[in-house]
Structure formats: structure tokens, C-alpha cells
Image: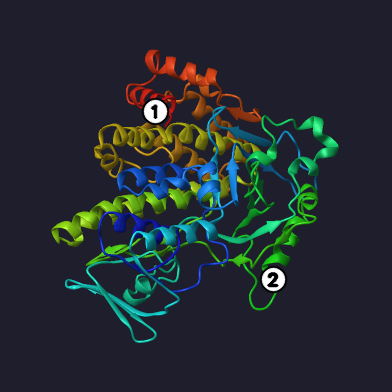
Amino acid sequence: MLGGSLPAATLATVLAAGGARVTVIDAAQPPPFPPGEMGVHAAGLFRVLAERYKAPELARLATVKDIHTHVTRTVGAEHCHSFVYHREGRPQDPAELLQVCPPKGAPPEPHFHRPDIDAYLLRCARERGADVRRGGKVSGAAAGPDGAAVRLSDGTEVRARYLVDASGPDSPLVSALGLRQEPAPFATASRTLAAHMTGVRPFADAVADRAAAYRPALPWHRGSMHHLTDGAYLAVLPLGNHPDSTGGLFSVALTLDARRFPPREGPGRTPEEEFRAFVARFPTLVDQFAYAAAEGPWLATERNQYAASRTVGDRWCLIGDAAGYVDPFISRGLGLTLEAVNALARRLLDAVRDGDFSTERFAEVGELTRDQLAANDELAAMVHASLCDPALVRAVLFVLEAGFRFGGFPLLAAWSELRSTGGDAALRALETVPHRGHVFAGHEGYHRLFTAAGATCAAVAAGELDARTASERIFRSVREAEFVPAAFKLDDPAARSLRITPVTLLRLALWSVTGAPKDIAPLVRAGIKSVLKGG
């Protein structure tokens, strides 16, 4: 296996736990800022992987408390998601923000400090018996009917029955097989400047002179903040916002529309200088980042998007960032990568047992990866197109919220079945549902809502529709969707907070019996049941 970061180390851990002999070649140093530090969706998948493959050490990454106790003190707690719109040269307008809060009392999802998390997972793989070789530079890789081979720069050759490349954008296998697609087959075109920073002021302090106009449902510092503006978004994730934290580290990532803000040719501003120049355009952000300083090097991409033409072949497979990448919005790619790990692991363990490593056995993993990348591209393209107008952004966030509120239920129900019966039939079924990779996979009604919203935003980006008309159209679609219950309160375009309360859950349970569509009522009931049982 090539790569030593989260996807490779997670897969190596579950394979070794299942009795497979695994060699991990970490050919390069990890990037200064690995993409994907928001643990929404990923945390639940770590629970599934731990239970399904009898690797309980992975479950330690599912909660803030367990990460703090067993892994690292540098972990963030996501009690809320805040989206704040900014206009150049003006203080932030409190009417142009939205805070989304999970159910009261629900444990927060973690924000991962990836250097610590990746190192922990690599230790887990080693402790399970994987042969972890770090620092070796890969000079060649090949695979065929008789197996796979990796050559290192010191002349060493490592042979295996199957090769998984999870190394990242500079994949040796992609290079050896000439798989990189040029140009990348995505509608999204973005680039990112990112670093871990200290000294980021609380947002509440930056708007303290107008505190009465804000009054969030939950304090801003209790979760992520996404600062949005025309052509860009800035994600700020606290990595120490819980009582037992020992530091004030933040994950900070500025993602720009690469077509409107292309990287400079030749020598020019450093990533930090470009970041500072961006922040200087927005008075409220100037206050928040006045004393912020990077801890370690900056990451700067020229374009985030890339892809391989194939991700599965004869005795080889690409997963994670080796297969392709779209955009860092809400770390969506991290959870999708773990879905691919989950699907690939069981097939590899079956292959180890029966000796059948045929390409056909792994074809579904390749199709899953293709669908995930396409879905993430649709989501990112819609978000970027909406950034031109705060009302349009809010409409898109309502569409996403409608999906997220349902989208986790299938995995939760499948995990509950796995724990109670030991059977993984429900998990296998999730690998083949329609519209894989979307925030609410498998549901036709949501897919139609999402697709229509994406087309509406694309029309705005093409100059064929004005943003206000587009936002009204999308809000109306959300209100009229029969699968969106009134209990969600997604019918008020002016709402500044969306919060799930115990009353919301009670009304949702009643709706699932009296008014929910037949294709969604059982899913809702199963999801609520799992939550009440401690899922």
C-alpha cells in the first residue's frame, strides 16, 4: 500500500485486523496541511469501520472525548456550523448569516488535527502488524495478472498480491500508468491557501461593538465558521474549543474561485501575503485575524481539482486523494474517502481468503469513487456559483441542510443493525444506492431538489438568471418538497438559525407516522430509534 496518511493508514489497520499481511510504504513526508479536518460524516464512518472490522481503536476517532483521552488534546468540538456573508469594504451585516445547530445534547462531531490523527492511525496499523516503511522514495510501480511490485529509489523491490495507492495527488501509480486526466473533468475550479494558526480572535470579539445585533443561538466559538463572499469562502475550524484543550490552534483555509482569482505567474506574493491581502478587504475579518499567526508552513494549490481516468485495474486500486480531488468545502471528501475504504476493505479481505483478485471483484469500488467525485463536484460547483449573493447562498444552504438532516440516517441504521445482529447487509446495500456520494444518497426526491438547485445556480453563473429570482425559486422548491417536514422549519428565508430541538424530534416522529412519504417514513423512524438507543 502506498501512502501513510488517513485513508492508507485506516485501510491498513482494518486489513491487518482481519488477518491480511500488509506493507505500507509512506513515500513522502505528509503535506503541511492535509485536506479534510472537519469530522462531520467521517466520525460515524470510524464507528462503522471499528465495529465491522473488529478494530476498536478506530472508534476512538468518533468523539471529541475519546480523541482527547486516547489520541491528542488538539481536537475541536463542532456544536454548530456558522455561515457568515461579507461584502468588501463593509462591516459584516448580521442579517446575512446563518447558524445551524444539531440537536441539543447531541455529542459534537470532532474537528481533526490531521497531523496527529494521521500519525495515530499509522501507529494503529503498525500495532496491528502492518509492515510500515517510512521515508522510502518510490521510483516505480507496476501491477498485472501475477501481482504488483513497487520499486524504491534505494533499489529495494516490494512485491504484493494487490497494490492500493492512497498516496495523494502525486501518486506513483497514476504516473506510472499515465492515468492523470488533463484537464480535470470537473465544473468546479478552485484553489486553496491554508495553514494552522494561533491568535485568531473570537468572532464575538470582532463584532463586540454591535453585540446586540447578533445574539447567536450558540456562541460562535463552539463550532466552525465559514466566512463567505463573492468568489471565495474562508473556513475557520477551532482545534481547541473544549474545556480540556491546551491550546488555541485553528485550521484556516481560504478557497478562491480559480477562474476569477488565478494564481500569480512567476515570483510574487507568498501564500500568507495573499491571505492577508484578502482579509484586508473585509473590516470584520481584519479584526478577527489582526493577531493571527501561522504555526508551520502554508499550503497553496494552483487548482484543487484533478482526477485519474481509471481508479481500478488488474491487481491495483486508487483511493482517497490518489484517485482525485474536488474541493475542501465542509471537508466533504474526507467522509467519502472513508466510504471507499469501507467498500474496498471487505473485498480485499475476501480476496485474501479465496485468492480471487480479479478486476471484476473491485469494479464496484471504482464506480463508487467515480460517483463520489462527480457528486462532490456538483455540490462544490453549486456552492461556488451561489457565492455571488447572500440570499442565494442561504437558499443553497437550506437545500444542503434538508439533505444533511436525513442523509446520516441510513448509515446510522446500518450501524445499529451491525451492532445488534452482526450482519452487514445494510452496509452492503448502501454501496449500491442511486446518487452515491450525495449528502442524501438514495433518495429520488432529494436528488431532484438538489439537481434543480444546482441548475438554477449554474444559470446565475452563466448570466442567464438574476440571483434574487434564483434564490426565490430554490426556497420555493424546498418549501414544496413533500419529503421536507414542517418540523425542519426550512420555510423562512430570513431565518438566522436552524436548530433541532427535542420538540423538533417529537414532531418529526409524529410526521413519520401520519404524513411522511412512504419512501422516507421507515428511514426516519429507524434513524430516530438509533439516536434514542445511543447511536
- 377 or 204: nearer the viewer: 204
Where's residue 378, x and y in %? 46, 48
Residue 181: name its quadrant. Answer: bottom left
Q: Which is more foreground, mark 2 or mark 1?
A: 1
Residue located 59% across and 51% down the image: 73
Where's residue 122, x and y in %? 43, 62
Quarter of the image that includes the C terminus: top left
Q: In this view, does 281 lie above or below 299?
A: above
- 364 or 79: nearer the viewer: 79
Q: Report which residue position mark 1 lands on.
A: 530
Residue located 34% across and 74% down the image: 178
Quarter of the image that includes the N terminus: bottom left
Q: As drawn, is 285 to the left or to the right of 329?
A: right
The reply to whether residue 368 is in sight is yes
Q: In this view, does 149 lie above or below 498?
A: below
User: Type of residue at label 2?
Assistant: Thr
User: Type of residue at label 1?
Assistant: Ser
Q: Is mark 2 on a helix, strand or loop?
A: loop
Q: Distance between the residues labelled 2 and 1?
A: 49 Å
Where's residue 187, x and y in %? 47, 55
Instruction: State the mark number for residue 169.
Output: none
Where's residue 355, x and y in %? 14, 61
Instruction: State the mark number for residue 270.
Output: 2
